[in-house]
Image (tube, coloured by chain):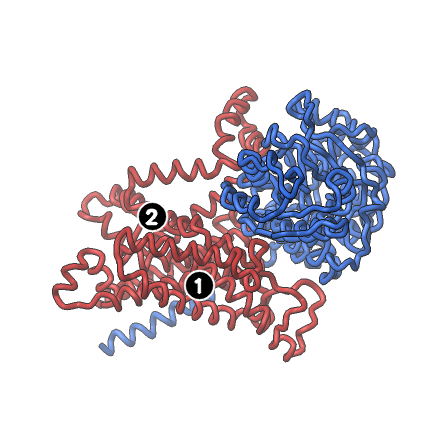
Amino acid sequence: MTDIIKKHVDRRGVIKGGMASILATGIMPSILTSPAYAADYLNAPTGKTVTLGFNVPQSGAYADEGADELRGYQLAVEHLNGGGDGGMLNTMTPKSLKGNGILGRKVEFVTGDTQTKSDAARASAKRMIEKDGAIMITGGSSSGVAIATQSLCQEAGVIFMAGLTHSNDTTGKDKRANGFRHFFNAYMSGAALAPVLEKAYGKERKAYHLTADYTWGWTQEASIAQATEAIGWKTVKKVRTPLGAGDFSQYITPVLNSGADVLVLNHYGKDMVNSLTQAVQFGLRDKQVNGKDFVIVVPLYSRLMAQGAGKNVEGIFGSTNWHWSLKDAGSQAFVKSFGQKYGFPPSQAAHTVYCQTLLYADACERAGTHNPCGVAEALEGFKFSGMGNGDTLYRAADHQCFKDVLVVEGNDKSTSKFDLLKVVQVVPAKQVTYAPDNPMFKGGELGKCNPGKA
Amino acid sequence: MSKKDLSVEYSTILIFALAILTMPIWLSPIGAGYPDLLQKFVIYGIFAVGFNILFGLTGYLSFGHAAFLGIGSYATVWSFKLLGMNVIPAVIFSIILAGSFAALIGYITLRRSGIYFSILTLAFAQMCYNLAYSVLTPITNGETGLRVLKTDPRIFDHLFGRGQVDGPLLTDLFGIHMTGYPGFYFCAILLIITYYIAMRIKRSPFGMMLKAIKSNQTRMNYTGFNTRPYLQTAFIISGMYAGLAGSLLAITDPLAGAERMQWTASGEVVLMTILGGVGTSLGPVLGAGLIKYFENIFSSYNDNTLHAALSFMPDWLNDVLTIIISPFVGSGWHLTLGALFMIIIIFLPGGIMEGMGRIIQIFKPNKPGGSTKTASQG
């Protein structure tokens, strides 16, 4: 027994010594070679190339949007490197881009799958930052994911150019100094949509909300409720549904017995396709309630969703960031080069990420550096036009773009499977602008820009 | 325990520790030598080692272990929010909370065995998931996930004058930030400690009892043993391991999301354990590493990277191969993992450890039974 104890102590000593030597040999080299210590900002490009990270959902409820985002990104990279016909590079004003990459460095990219989950998105973004040396992360087709990735980029010290994220919180209470959003938000949808709804359906309406249960759904529900209540509508009930539910029949059946005559679907992607299709199949739109025709409103529309829902979208109002049928030079140039490359028109998702990539590159050129602090400064308060939404401002106070918003309606006379939405009204930026301290956006602060460890 | 066994044990743990701590070096060539993935390797290693204490030793297949992972994460983030950014209270708090939940859930579910036990644990985990996802939104922040905010109380941080942070809030161990490589080494040391504990549990009389439950519980009961306390203890220990893993996930990245508790996450740890080798000590760690490698590296391949990787071939062959391979990488990584899983289950029911045992046996043809022996020692 004593023998064993003695041995025990001896071996423990051996292990301790072993550990110490492992720590000495194992940790030291990796600290010294850590890329964070190589320059005055994280992932500073040293060679002839610069790497961007495109983090989009390739599986889950928003996979279709993710696939189109990736197409938009690839087109943007092609144009930045001087390939193709240049697209919006020819229409954007003011412009510092030269078509030779960013600051003379060829643009390369890495991709990742966010799986529409915050965990997976952050793991994927971390891989891009830590392993691939990405200097900017962009993407996200869910506000939950976008907010999670945005705060990661703030902590790590790279720029985050938000893709498809419509929640007020992204540039509201969860805004970050390193994050920028080109896409419009739920408040803007409400502000743009309410006058059109008032004109079409009158002041005496009772609305029933079905809402995707996460940050985007919550803020859109609040925004639409506020905007419609301002025109005299009543909100009967707000029901939350889990993201990616698939079957919404249990949520739709109670709608008719609630006394509501409007159904507001705060859903997006495959969720919206499913809930709208089921609502139509249940015959909601053929019913009469309170002596009025029952109507459905989908506040956030996209062409991809309209394509999924097919004929069910006819006559349904909604808002959208951009649509390919716009006739301005920027939109036309983008639709032309996208169509030539892929054979069909781009969605609003492809448009916003394309713009974001160009805007980032342009800001680098103007700042003369990739340093996130320099880039952020160049983007703040930047006024530009020729990118499809008229005159646009990147507001410094919250890093949100202010531009025209489209109110659209499901097209009942569609000529092709892409011609499913028609633009009812282009709502000017002034009408959807709000003060940075609007109650719906309160509670957050940008903080200081973080260039990564110096 | 004989002297020889002890020396085998020490050399095993020494080799294991060496292998884990040098991971940044030997995993770089295959593109996995970056902190985030290394952290995931060791954290899910801990999760799988703990799961193996229950599933590998007693044969009770829990389909709800992700619930403890999630509880550990939420407990850690709340500890950051309330107490401060130091990781020590967070870890302790998480292990205790996950352990008490395991005691409660185990007390109810362990009344049944076999498939009924699995279904019960699955039901509990889904309940936890749904609670976290929508009902308990004030505590868990729902789908958006729970994060540390600058406005949080963080009592101890303010007490020691570290309340005002200029940059982002980072978790720390007495001044060392738990991100990047320091975070990895923190997790790695915990993996080595917990691995050693699991190894000792397996060889203890308690471990023998668990293995006896696996081989024939009815006979155990007839000979007068009450097996419930043993099962309950194994369940709690395993839940505490999961809580620790969940805590480490939140320490290296201070965000806790409900999807961590979903049944797919519970299924993942079952896959890890089976892929590596059920009942072996090392197997679950290998399985965890393999699955995380697939999830992070294979999913990042796109057509461009494939073209670049195959650029040494003639152009036409490059194009053809890219078309053939591309459905299996990128968003198709699940497909590859599924195929690999099937192949391993059909040809190597004992997982990777059985495969390694067979290879060792080829080189030692004269020693009978080498396969099972190596497996049980590893």
Q: What element carries label 2?
A: helix
Q: Residue at x 53, y 39 (%)?
A: A59
Q: Where is residue A172 in the image (x, y as percent from the top left)?
A: 72, 56
Q: Tell me where residue A7 appears, x and y as whole percent.
A: 29, 73
Any part of residue B305 in sight: yes
Which residue position holds label 2?
B274
Is A169 situated left or right of A86 in this image? left
Is residue A140 visible in this depiction of the protein? no
How dense is the environment of label 2, judged by Cα within 10 Å: few (below 14), some, or many (20 and up)?
many
Would you place residue B289 above or below residue A89 in this image? Answer: below
Q: In this view, does A150 lie above or below A405?
A: below
Kindly indicate which chain is depicted in red in the rendered structure. Answer: B
> How far apart are the alpha carbons under marks 2 and 1?
21 Å
Judged by depth in the image, the label closer to the viewer, 2 or 1, is: 1
What is the chain letter for disc 2? B
Q: Where is B3 relative to A231, above or below?
A: below
Q: Residue sitting at 49 percent across and 48 percent down?
A: B27
Front-lying residue, A112 or A37? A112
Residue nearest the viewer, comparing A353 with B198: A353
In the rendered image, what is the letter of the chain coloured blue? A
Q: Nearer the viewer, residue A258 or A89?
A: A258
Q: Quarter of the image for the C terminus of chain A: give it.
A: bottom right
Instruction: Say which mark, if any, is on residue A247.
Output: none
Q: The residue under label 1 is which amino acid type?
A: Gly
Q: Callout 2, which amino acid?
A: Ile
Going by the image, does B206 lie left or right of A412?
Answer: left
The residue singled out by tag 1 in the image is: B243
Q: Mark 1 lies on which chain?
A: B
